[in-house]
Amino acid sequence: MQWVQDPSRSIVDNLSNVRSDISRHCRNKKKEYQKSKMEEHEINSKIKNSRNLYGGISDCNKSYHSRTNIGKDGRGDLFTGSHSILSRWKNHFSQLFKIH
């Protein structure tokens, strides 16, 4: 808020320093997490616990996929919103099972 109200050089530098500190902190936390997961994989490998080893490896290899909340009505028009999506599924299954 200070930067928006008074964008002086000292406030901008302070904001930049805070951002870099936070980025460094997050980077270090991520490295610690990844190191602990690798140690866990090593332990699973040494004790021949292949199920947990390969499960952990596949979890590490998965990338982030955002969730889309878009649906189509009976005419093919797109819509969004959780309430309209739920009502569409309700109508779909009531027609499918012929429940009125």
Image (cartoon, grey):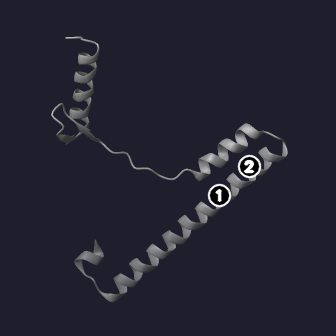
Name the spot of residue 60 as percent of width and height, x first.
61, 51
43 horizontally vs 60: left or right? right
| Disc 1 secondary structure class | helix
Name the spot of residue 19 as percent of width and height, x first.
44, 73
96 horizontally vs 31: left or right? left
Above or below residue 44? Residue 88 is: above
Q: Hey, what amino acid is under mark 2?
A: His
Asked whether the beta carbons under mark 1 and mark 2 sit within 8 Å of each other, the answer is no
Q: Which residue is mark 2?
A: 41
Name the spot of residue 72 as percent of width and height, x first.
22, 37
21 horizontally vs 69: left or right? right
Residue at 73%, 49% in the rendered image: 40
78 horizontally vs 14: left or right? left
| Disc 2 secondary structure class | helix
Q: Nearer the viewer, residue 18 or 24?
A: 24
Q: Which residue is farthest bottom?
A: 9
Q: Nearer the viewer, residue 1 or 43?
A: 43
Q: Hey, what amino acid is under mark 1?
A: Gln
Q: Which residue is mark 1?
A: 34
Above or below residue 56? Residue 51 is: above
What is the CA distance from the residue labelled 1 to the residue labelled 2? 10 Å
Q: Which residue is farthest top?
A: 99
Q: Quadrant of the C terminus?
A: top left
Badge 1: few (under 14), some or many (20 or more) residues near its Cα, within 10 Å?
A: few
Residue at 27%, 27% in the rendered image: 89
Q: Earlier in the sequence, mark 1 or mark 2?
A: 1
